[in-house]
Amino acid sequence: MLLRHLCVALWVSALLCTPAVAAKKPLRSKSAAAPAKGYDAEARLIQIYQRIGLAQTREALKLADQLVKDYPHFALAQLVHGDLLMAQTRPLKAMGDMPEATVRAAAPGTLAELREESLLRIKALRERPPVGMVPSQFVKLSPRNRHAIAVDPSRARLYLFENEANGLRLIADFYMSVGKLGIDKSVEGDLRTPLGVYFITNTLDPNALKDLYGAGALPINYPNPYDLRRGKTGSGIWLHGVPSNQFARAPKATDGCVAVSNPDLQRILATVQIRTTPVVIAPSLQWVDPAKSVPDAKAFENVWEQWRSTKSSGDLTRTMAFYTADFNSYGKTLGDWTGVVKNEIGQARGKPAQIKDQSILYSPESAQNATMVVTYSEVRAGYTTGSTKRQYWLRSPATQNQWKIFFEGVIG
């Protein structure tokens, strides 16, 4: 009877009252930094859930005793610990079955947020990414993209990848929080987290930040050219930590940023590189076999090669047909950019430039709209180095469902 009530209290009777779920073991990479202290806290919490599911309530309580001792600011662990203690004296009606006066004394919504956090942590660990699969956004990464990040708000999860010789490999994943009002940011102050393809632009020193941001912050390039094209506003979207008096924040708790625990952020800070690490944020990640091209991706790569060969041929008119009428590059219109392209064609003198370090990132917004973000180095004949460029391509009814360039510019 005690076990049945406790499993109901944890909302996981259907998920964890079998030995099917093992505690998540940290994934390791040869090049990744060792996990920071506290990185194991979630795995230990899941071990407690597992012991409950196996009717090992005494063992579960011992584990919970030690977990809250080690991390007294881990609110969800404290809640589970309290439930285990309470269950020794009476059946529990729900997770966090505490006196009404205690609930009223807490911040509004706290109990509901902890229940949601618990469910999302379990969901992410039950619905593990298929081995060898990658998010569909990562069409192609260059060796310069040593790591990549994917954020899935539907599971409150951030996935960290290493780009190896054989392709992307998932090396770690973390519970994370998004904006108070969810995702799909549109305007300044709407308390939502943006969706799309971004890049880490900088590293901010925690000593120069408020305690709210914890162990530090990694800004991303929101608003990117596609955001600006759609009139989206706002700034200061970061991947950051949590206040020192918290272990984790509620699933929806930020002003629009992505927040992870401080130990998890320290792991990320020690691993990723600025400017070359892509960050994709999607409502729900779609995992695909990297050996099989997404139909949109294959069609796009053919178009990209057509653009490149047309430009190399020196045909300015046909080259500019690949650009949208409302093209804009840092204030330069299509007319302005035609002059830039004409100059590049003239300098090439009919000798194709060598393309190096190409990466392609896919952002399917809907069945009708999709974007591709292409980053590459272009080395002209006779040179050993060249500029790094980035393009944004759009396929939508506005482009007659053809891939067209609406932004292009030098980024390094």
Image: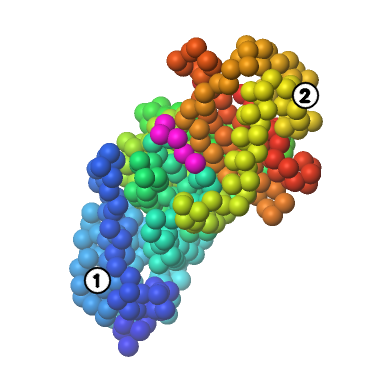
**Residue 319, how many percent across, how many down?**
72, 27
Would residue 104 be found to the left or right of residue 223 on screen?
A: left
Judged from the image, the secondary structure of the residue bearing numbered disc 2 is helix
Judged from the image, the secondary structure of the residue bearing numbered disc 1 is helix
Q: Quadrant of residue 394?
A: top right
- Whether residue 143 appears in magenta in the rendering, the answer is yes
**Residue 280, how many percent across, how many down?**
52, 44
Q: Specify the amino acid type for callout 1.
A: Ala
In terms of sequence position, does the residue under pointer 1 or pointer 2 come before the other? 1
**Residue 123, how many percent across, how many down?**
44, 65
Is residue 225 placed above or below 184 in the rendered structure? above
Q: CA distance from mark 1 to mark 2?
A: 71 Å
Q: Main secondary structure of the magenta part?
A: loop
Tell me the tag on residue 32.
none
The residue drawn where x is 36% and y is 65% is: 79
Q: Quadrant of the N terminus?
A: bottom left
How crowded is the residue under tag 2: few (<14 C-alpha within 10 Å), some, or many (20+)? few
The part of the chain drawn in magenta is: 140-144
Instruction: Inspect this view and state whether residue 309 appears.
Output: yes
Q: Which residue is mark 1?
A: 60
The residue drawn where x is 66% and y is 16% is: 345
- Whether residue 115 appears in magenta in the rendering, the answer is no
Would residue 372 be found to the left or right of residue 229 on screen?
A: left
Would residue 125 be found to the left or right of residue 45 on screen?
A: right
Would residue 213 be found to the left or right of residue 255 on screen?
A: left
The residue drawn where x is 50% and y is 12% is: 382
Tell me the tag on residue 317.
2
